[in-house]
Each structure stands twice: as structure tokens, then as C-alpha cells.
Image: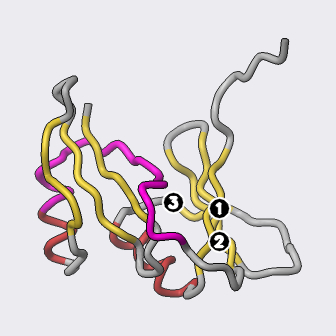
């Protein structure tokens, strides 16, 4: 049986790369990392010590669904304040999960659902 060690990266489709770079880089504070010269536009970020987020520009329909990425923050109240200050709509929450974790959902500029959480 194959044994998975950990997540390596998550890739999501975006359409407006510059607006999404603002959201993930400026609003969420993710660190840009080098990206190979693929034959399509995109941008990469480091998320924590071992995972990456890969933005890929494709002409695909971005589904309006519960599919999402979840990013854990150090300070949940500060995250709420930052989202509101940058006029990012919170589409669900803030609330508490049954395990006591804080959560909220927002969307990136292209409609990808993003959960902000604190365990």
C-alpha cells in the first residue's frame, strides 16, 4: 500500500491573477516562492513549513460549491479585522466548530472559497 507523507501543494484555478495575488499575498500574507516557467500564467505561495498554494490561470468555470482550502491563522480576531479592513466579504461565520475551533469562510476575487480557521 502507498503511504502518503503529507500535503505538498494545492492548486486552484483563477482568472484574474493580479487581483488574486493581491488577495493571497497582501490580504492573507502568504509568501511568494519561485515558480517554474510553465506555458500558462500562475503564481506560487508557501503555506506553512511544508505546503504550497499554486494559482493557475485557466479559462475554466470556478464552481460555486463547498470545495475550499483552509488556512490556519495565529490570531483569529486579527484575521477578521484584516478581512473587514480590506473589504473582503465573510460569506459564512465567524463561528465555532464542534471541536471548538474558530472558522469563517470568504472568497478570493475569482470566487474560490477560502476557510480561515484557528484551532
Question: Would you say 94 lies left or right of 103 here?
Answer: left
Question: Would you say 30 lies left or right of 117 here?
Answer: right
Do the numbered discs 3 and 1 sit on residues whose CB atoms are within 8 Å? no
Comes first in the chain, label 3 or label 1: 3
Disc 3 vs disc 1: which is toward the camera?
1
**Residue 97 painted magenta:** no
Residue receiving disc 1: 54
**Residue 67 painted magenta:** yes
Q: Determine the secondary structure under disc 3.
A: strand
Residue 23 point in image, percent of width and height? 40, 74
Q: CA distance from mark 2 to mark 3?
A: 11 Å
How packed is label 2: few (under 14 Cα within 10 Å), some, or many (20 or more)? some
Residue 80 falls in which quadrant of the image?
bottom left
Give whichever of 19, 70 is nearer the camera: 70
What residue lies at 51% left-to-right and 48% top-to-bottom?
47
Residue 69 vs 81, above or below: the answer is above
Comes first in the chain, label 2 or label 1: 2
Residue 103 point in image, percent of width and height? 23, 45
Tag of residue 6: none
Residue receiving disc 2: 43
Numbered range of the magenta stretch: 63-80
Do the numbered discs 2 and 1 sit on residues whose CB atoms are within 8 Å? yes
Image quarter of the N terminus: top right
How packed is label 1: few (under 14 Cα within 10 Å), some, or many (20 or more)? some
Residue 118 vs 37, above or below: the answer is above
Tag of residue 31: 3
What residue lies at 52% left-to-right and 70% top-to-bottom?
63
Q: CA distance from mark 3 to mark 1?
A: 12 Å
Q: Determine the secondary structure under disc 2.
A: strand
Amino acid at each position: 500500500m502507498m503511504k502518503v507523507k503529507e500535503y505538498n501543494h494545492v492548486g486552484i484555478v483563477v482568472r484574474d491573477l493580479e487581483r488574486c495575488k493581491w488577495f493571497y499575498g497582501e490580504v492573507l500574507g502568504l509568501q511568494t516562492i519561485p515558480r517554474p516557467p510553465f506555458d500558462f500564467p500562475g503564481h506560487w505561495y508557501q503555506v506553512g513549513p511544508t505546503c504550497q498554494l499554486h494559482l493557475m490561470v485557466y479559462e475554466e468555470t470556478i464552481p460555486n460549491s463547498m470545495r475550499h482550502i483552509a488556512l490556519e491563522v495565529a490570531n483569529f480576531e486579527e484575521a477578521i479585522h484584516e478581512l473587514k479592513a480590506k473589504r473582503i466579504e465573510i460569506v459564512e461565520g465567524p463561528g465555532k466548530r464542534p471541536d471548538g475551533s474558530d472558522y469563517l469562510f470568504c472568497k478570493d476575487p475569482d470566487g474560490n472559497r477560502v476557510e480561515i480557521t484557528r484551532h
